[in-house]
Amino acid sequence: MIEELDLLKKDWKKSESSFQQISESDIYKMIHKKSSSIVKWILIISVLEFIFLRGLDFLILFDADYTKKMEQIHLYDFEIILTVFNYVVLIVFIYLFYKNFKRINAASSTKKLMDDILNTRKIVKYYVWYNLFLVGVSSAIAVFSEIKYNPQLASMYESNKVILFLLSFGIVLVLFVVFWLFYKLLYGILIRRLHKNYTELKKIDF
């Protein structure tokens, strides 16, 4: 009787182990598929954002009124340099998103997928902070040049320095917050989903 119970226990443990392996394999496949889909959407959104916003930048640069305005406040050359620089940096980011998408698609182990998810989250965060930094710096320079070189504002500057400074700071802050909310909504949801996938993978790996 005792021997029969021992045999039953051994069979049960084998069955439990087999069930656990199948379950973990299914979970990994599901997380792998979800992670791949999330990174694909990050890639698609970044490409669409690049086409729309950078395309808008390109068209504005050839607008006669805008060109005249930028030349008046001594920002036209700066705008061209910044636009070209921004194009190069964003293309590099899009390439990295594409590379991460291919890596996650080809991930062959839980550890590899976890590493790829962490790498993707890190690059997306760099991408968001780069864009926010660019918004802050370019807005500050634009507002400063507007005050300094616009004849109407320049005449007010001497007598209303504090008011103009606070107004300029407020404009830059509002623009920064608007773009921060935009990127938080756009990429924040996807990043949180990737983090959730990473947490689920840790349960499998450890």
Image: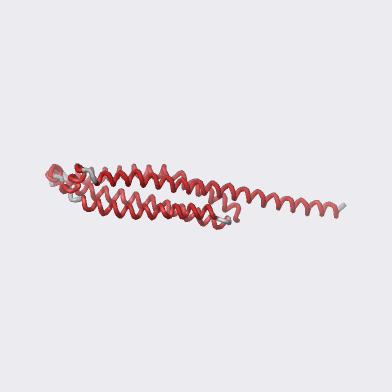
Tell me what residue is drawn at x 58 percent, y 56 percent.
109
Number of marks: 0
Q: Looking at the picture, how far across and down is residue 175, in whole percent?
A: 30, 43
Report the side of 17 relative to 184 (left or right): right
- Picture quadrant where residue 155 is located: top left
**Residue 127 relative to residue 175: left or right:** right
Horizontal and vertical percent position of residue 6: 82, 54
- x, y percent for residue 197: 54, 49
Q: Which residue lies most toward the right here?
A: 1
**Residue ID at (70%, 49%):** 19
Q: Is residue 162 visible?
A: no
- Residue beneath the point at 41% across and 43% down: 186
Q: Nearer the viewer, residue 71 or 73?
A: 71
How are the residues colored?
secondary structure
Q: Position of residue 4 (x, y in %)?
A: 85, 52
Looking at the image, which is closer to me, 54 or 201? 54
Look at the image and tell me whether residue 109 can be seen: yes
Quadrant in which the C terminus appears: bottom right
In the image, taking residue 171 as reference, residue 122 lies left or right, namely right
In-image side of 102 versus 69 (left or right) = right
